[in-house]
Image (cartoon, grey):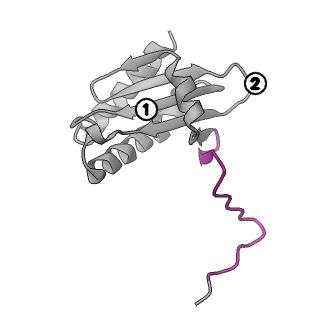
Amino acid sequence: MKPPKATQGSQSDASAPLLAVSACLLVIKERSDFLACNRGPYRSVKGFVLQARNRHDDSDTMRIGFTCSKKVGNAVARNRAKRRLREIARLTLPSMGHAGWDYVLIGKREVTATRDFQTLLKDLKYALKKVHE
């Protein structure tokens, strides 16, 4: 069986470093962008760590990265933690994030995957407010 042919409008480039989550939110995939964000302000909350960086460009997009090390748990726990981080970012960043900024959310051991979802949302709102002060 042959795979379906790509249509004119769908261009899937596997080497593209950024993927769109929403209209104003792109996903960071490059290690250099994660390292640059590591040098910026950060806020550690109970559920995760938020790192931020102002890119100082005139872009109206925000970029977001997610990471969970093996300390978070096995693959199932890491994937669950990242899914939860992606969802809180999707719900919160378009309204509370600043254009032209990069954000990285780092999962914590035994907390990110099991913490109440509404509490994680409150954690992100608090961390964003503190980072932008």
Q: Residue furthest right?
A: 8
Q: Is residue 97 magenta?
A: no
Q: Is residue 18 magenta?
A: yes
Q: Is residue 100 left or right of residue 72?
A: right
Instruction: Please state which of residues 132 and 70 is positioned toward the viewer in this rendering.
Output: 70
Quarter location, residue 6 = bottom right
Q: Earlier in the sequence, mark 1 or mark 2?
A: 2
C-alpha span from label 1 to label 2: 23 Å
Dominant secondary-structure state across the stretch colored magenta:
loop
Q: Can the viewer see residue 97?
A: no
- Residue located at (47% from left, 23% from top): 51
Instruction: Please state which of residues 35 and 129 is positioned toward the viewer in this rendering.
Output: 35
Above or below: residue 105 compared with residue 70: above
Disc number placed over residue 58 in the picture, else none: 2
Disc number placed over residue 35 in the picture, else none: none
Q: Position of residue 13 (x, y in %)?
A: 68, 58
- Residue located at (30% from left, 42% from top): 70
> Label 2 is placed on what type of residue?
Asp
Which residue is labeled 1 in the image? 105
Q: Is residue 115 left or right of residue 103?
A: left
Q: Position of residue 17 (x, y in %)?
A: 63, 45
Above or below: residue 117 compared with residue 14: above
- Residue located at (62% from left, 82% from top): 3
Q: Which residues are magenta?
A: 3-24
Quarter location, residue 47 = top left
Quarter location, residue 32 = top right
Q: Secondary structure at mark 2?
A: loop
